[in-house]
Image: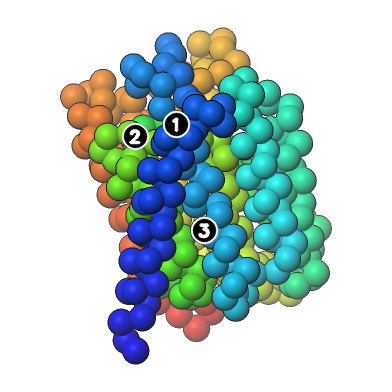
Amino acid sequence: MTDWPILIFVVITFLSFTGCLALERQSHKLGLMDSPGERKLQTTPIPRSGGMVIFILYLLFSSSISFSIPNTFLIGALVVYLGGLYDDYISINKVSIKVVFQVIAVLLAATNFYLQYDLPPSILVIGVGFMFLMINSFNLMDNMNGLTAGMSFVLIVFFYASGFTTLYEMLALTGALAGFLLRNFPRGHIFLGDQGSQLLGYLMSGFALRALAPHFVTGGRVTDWAFASILLVVGFLPFIVDTIVVVVIRIKNKQSIMKGDQNHLSHQLVRRGFSLVFAPLVLVGFHALCAIICYYCLTHVLPNSF
């Protein structure tokens, strides 16, 4: 009996791996290919449909096994995924369309948080803003093989260890991510695409807010509010820093903040001599350190509050 979680993980990893293999062969027919460009690292078209495998596996397991996931949260995941899929399909960065899907998705999640925890409006606004920021930050961070998927793997393991997610949520997503990473890192045979990176940003930020929401309710202690806020920042620190750095550089260079470039943390590490394999590993390792710090704080600093 003690081996069944490992068996589930292996099965989901296998399904993810084979799903990625199948999509690699069919993505050109689906119109889901990422072409080389000035701001991209690949020299040949690469399928950008890996997010489809992660979404399908997550949806299947969240529907077939008893999850503690409200329907509005799952509907929001579907909406943000469809927005990314549409963007991947048309191959044009339609910011306005992308934003509409993202806003609808985070409002669905916020509706659940409000109904379940009766959060004050100010906290709801901050929560919506945080989820919107993370959806786009995960999308921006997805600029090198293994980066966003590797960091998401770190986050979901940390969330499970901290009691933020169920065992089945953790197994479904770690298995899906592991199978994808076998085809994405170090050599990128398939990419997440906007559909995958935005979905992961939605899920990871949603899981964190779902777990911390009770500590933001009206009448909660100020120390709980402050500690929950710090946990959000530290837990997502690489994404926050990367987004700030990129936006500042684009504003300084008088460029649109929505136009892609190679000024991300990963690109800067490569320019300083790190390889395309080692640079993402450094950032994933740093993120793992942030997660360990958060876990230590949860279990030692205020264990009675969280």
Residue 228 versus residue 134 in the image, above or below: below
Looking at the image, tell me whether mark 3 or mark 1 is earlier in sequence order.
1
Q: Position of residue 5 (x, y in %)?
A: 37, 77
Mark sitting on residue 47: 1
Q: Identify the residue at image location x=34%, y=17%.
A: 43
Residue 113 versus residue 129 in the image, above or below: below
Residue 114 horizontal side relative to residue 98, left or right: right
Looking at the image, tell me whether mark 3 or mark 2 is earlier in sequence order.
3
Q: Quadrant of residue 153?
A: bottom left
Residue 139 horizontal side relative to residue 133, left or right: left
Q: Nearer the viewer, residue 172 or 123?
A: 172
Mark sitting on residue 189: 2
Q: Position of residue 257 (x, y in %)?
A: 58, 21
Residue most extreme to the bottom: 1
Mark sitting on residue 57: 3
In this view of the protein, can residue 155 be seen by the observer? no
